[in-house]
Image (spheres, helix red, strand yellow):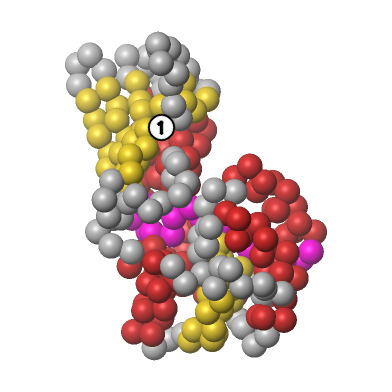
Amino acid sequence: MKITLVGNGRMGRQITDIVTRSGEHTILRVLDAVDTIDAAAFAGTDAIIDFTVREAFLANYPALIASGKPVVVGTTGWDDVMDRIKGEVVASGASMLYSANFSLGVNIFLRTLREASRLIAPFRQFDIALCEQHHTGKADFPSGTGLKAAEVVLSANPRKRSVAKQLEEGRKIREDELQVAALRLGSVFGVHTAFIDSDADSIELTHTAKNRNGFASGAVHAATWLVARHVMRPGFYTMDDFLNDLFAE
């Protein structure tokens, strides 16, 4: 598989390293996030992997779609326009897979969190909150994975109906709000924790990333899957679609 990388930041360099060491695929070219990109830039490519920032992705996604190549997107912070972009992908017959986090461990954490949220839902004595930690260079706040975790909780626990990212001074959190706290600290790769608490006991679910290898290899595996899926069933996909397909096998 010949891959064009859009973005040459930490994740882009990690993906290049993973692909180079594996010998299974090839990095055809690397496009910097500040480059002016058009569809012709992806000639000869089998798959595109985008790890940039919100502004760059929003400027470049029309070219990504127009290229006709399967696109894996790890750029976060564009949830507010996702429905519109998803519609454009589907309408154009393109294929895009988006995930805030491609780590297999994180996705197992999210599935575990969904089940825990469902199990505590009938018991009002159990409350739940989320916290994520990342390095000081991370731009979005809370992280895409933190917001995905919140989405998982809200979908599984009807007692939580909205997300509280920050509380105004003097205001108490409402019973139906899910707090998602965010810390930016040093060079932390990523730590996501769900805190479940009652008067009698507490439960913590935590995923800690030791390095970026899991994110990078997951993105490459997702690209391989999307290339095969694009031939017969183009569309907009998530990591859940990818994992459900693997688990079914």
Nearest the camera: 209 or 107?
209
State the image coordinates of residue 226 (x, y, percent, origin top left): 58, 69
Residue 60 placement: quadrant:
bottom right
Name the residue: 71% across, 74% down.
38
Q: Residue furthest left?
A: 200
State the image coordinates of residue 245 (x, y, percent, origin top left): 52, 61
191 relative to 164, above or below: below
Give the magenta part as a residue range: 92-107
- Say whether residue 178 is visible: no
Q: Residues within 10 Å of mark 1 (few under 14, many from 20)?
A: many
State the image coordinates of residue 50 (x, y, percent, origin top left): 55, 67
Name the residue: 44% across, 68% down.
9
- Say whether residue 41 is visible: yes
How many numbered discs?
A: 1
Which residue carries the number 1 mark? 180
223 relative to 119, above or below: below
Nearest the camera: 126 or 248?
126
Residue 11 painted magenta: no
Residue 105 placement: quadrant:
bottom left
182 relative to 51, above or below: above
Relative to 56, is 107 on the left or the right? left
State the image coordinates of residue 42 (x, y, percent, origin top left): 65, 80
Label 1 sits on a secondary structure element that is: strand
Question: Residue flagged by tag 1: what amino acid is it?
Answer: Val
Nearest the camera: 204 or 50?
50
Name the residue: 38% across, 59% down.
103
Residue 171 placement: quadrant:
top left
Name the residue: 47% across, 46% down.
140
